[in-house]
Image (cartoon, grey):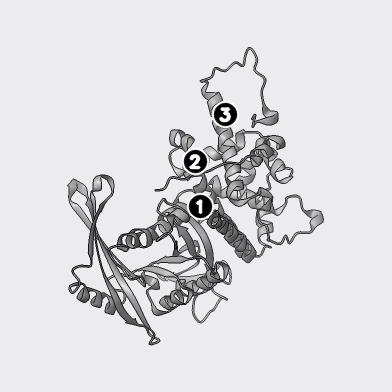
Amino acid sequence: MDSRGEASQESGPGNVRGPEDPVDRDEKEQQKIVEALIATFQHFFGSWRTLFSGVSDPRAPRRITYPLSALAFSGILMFLFRLQARREIALKLRNHASNSKFNALFGSPRSPHGDTLENTFSRLEPDSVQEWVCGLTESLIRGKLLYRYRLFDRFFVVAVDGTGTLTYRQRHCQHCLTRKTHGVTLYYHSVLEAKLVTSNGFAFTLMTEFIENPGENPTKQDCELKAFYRLAQRIRARFPRLPISLALDGLFACGPVFQICRQYGWNFMITLKDDDLPNINNEFRGLLTLHPENILRWRTGKANKIHLTLSWVNNISYIDTKEIEHTISVVECLEERPGQNQVPQATTFRWITPVAVSTRNVLELATNAGRIRWKLENEGFNVQKNGGYGLEHAYTQDPTSAKVFYLLLQVAHMLAQLLEKGSLLREILKKKIGSSKNVAFRILEAWRNTRFSATSLNLILEQRIQIRFESG
């Protein structure tokens, strides 16, 4: 198929390229990149024209130039290409090749301007955009993409953690959180994110809860723990039959969280630090000496140089502040790995879980339900903050459109993971690109330089494809 469509060039005496011409190879690779981008989204999430399906358009129909799907796509591309500013949409995505693709995909005359996105997003309902994002993740679950990564071949591991997104010296809106640093009041916004995480590095957003005050002078500020109670209720309502194992940090080691998980039938692995729940820590240490059989040693990593010593105690009773009794298990993992000059470096991890632990399941609990929580911080927040997505950049001053942009960032990161870990671009990425930022730049250049006719794009969308992912 000639993906360039109308942009094909005739070969002439002064324009003859050999089979190994690097320019020709580069053009073909750029075509494959754009084809992979278009086909990957279509394969997992359906038609491009269904972007923002279910989201009400507040604009007067007679004044609409760009459909909502085109605006959503433009926002996703801004994050996927790591443009880091709305104005870059007009600068980078309004050339002829890009405009032709927008016209073929959405019937719009060109790529929308960044200000058009901001103006429209400020009038959308963030909850309906959130529901659309939930639908994308649900399609990955229903398509069994994540089945091989389930805990005990049943539970989807969901890591929950909060992070700051925006910080201001002056009040940004009535929902700002506040804190004082060296006598200076800072105003900021945070989110609590629930992501499906896997051993091969996927971190797909399941649901987002925005942490925000109800007004300028609340009696008590909103916080991660309050947001978790709301988020858990929403996840249960949206995914009532999804088998979940939560991966949480020590902030959530408390009776109400235990009770919620028991009520919803969720497993959990919650980090237990030395200064968290001292009664449980003391009982664990005391009972461990009485159960020397509860130990498993394991070697892993390159050349088996990482040594794990796993120990555990079951049936520890914990009575919370509401006098509700919980029966839990505690798992401890001592990890030793070579450091400088081959001197072993030891790190201890400890978790609380409702699961009865044994030699058969302790390794999987520790590695695929406990340690895996760091993937939310690394593959999730760290990449989005330091990998060019600009999570902490203010793409708008409007609090409503800020939420929409945040949710589109999550979709762009989801799509980037599917592209980078999928089989369609595996050989090109290994040979040519390297870091995640370079991947984004390469995809941007391919999008800007390759021209596709409506006919050639339709042929790409009609193809049946298979996308495979490396297991770990």
Using a 10 Å C-alpha cutoff, classify the residue at mark 1 as few (fewer than 14 neighbours), some (14 to 19) or many (20 or more): some
Q: Which mark is residue 65?
A: none
Give SS at disc 1.
loop
Give SS at disc 3.
helix
88 or 391, which is in the foreground?
391
Amino acid type at mark 2: Ser
Query: How far is the residue under mark 1 from the one under mark 2?
Result: 13 Å
Looking at the rendered image, the disc whose residue lies closer to the viewer, 1 or 2, is 1
Mark 3 and mark 2 lie on one chain; the one further toward the N terminus is 3
Residue 457: % across, % down: 67, 38
Query: How far is the residue under mark 3 from the one under mark 2?
Result: 20 Å
Q: Can the viewer see residue 398?
A: no
Mark 1 and mark 3 lie on one chain; the one further toward the N terminus is 3
Amino acid type at mark 1: Leu
Left or right of 466, for residue 58: right
Residue 57: % across, % down: 72, 60
Q: Which residue position holds label 3?
A: 27
Amino acid type at mark 3: Glu
Q: Can the viewer see residue 384?
A: yes
Q: Quadrant of residue 137?
A: bottom right
Q: Residue at x 54, y 28 (%)?
A: 26
Left or right of 255, for residue 229: right
C-beta proximity under 8 Å, tags 1 and 3: no
Vertical placement of residue 124 versus 256, above or below? above
Q: Which residue position holds label 1?
A: 145
Q: Quadrant of residue 351?
A: bottom left
Q: Which residue position holds label 2?
A: 423
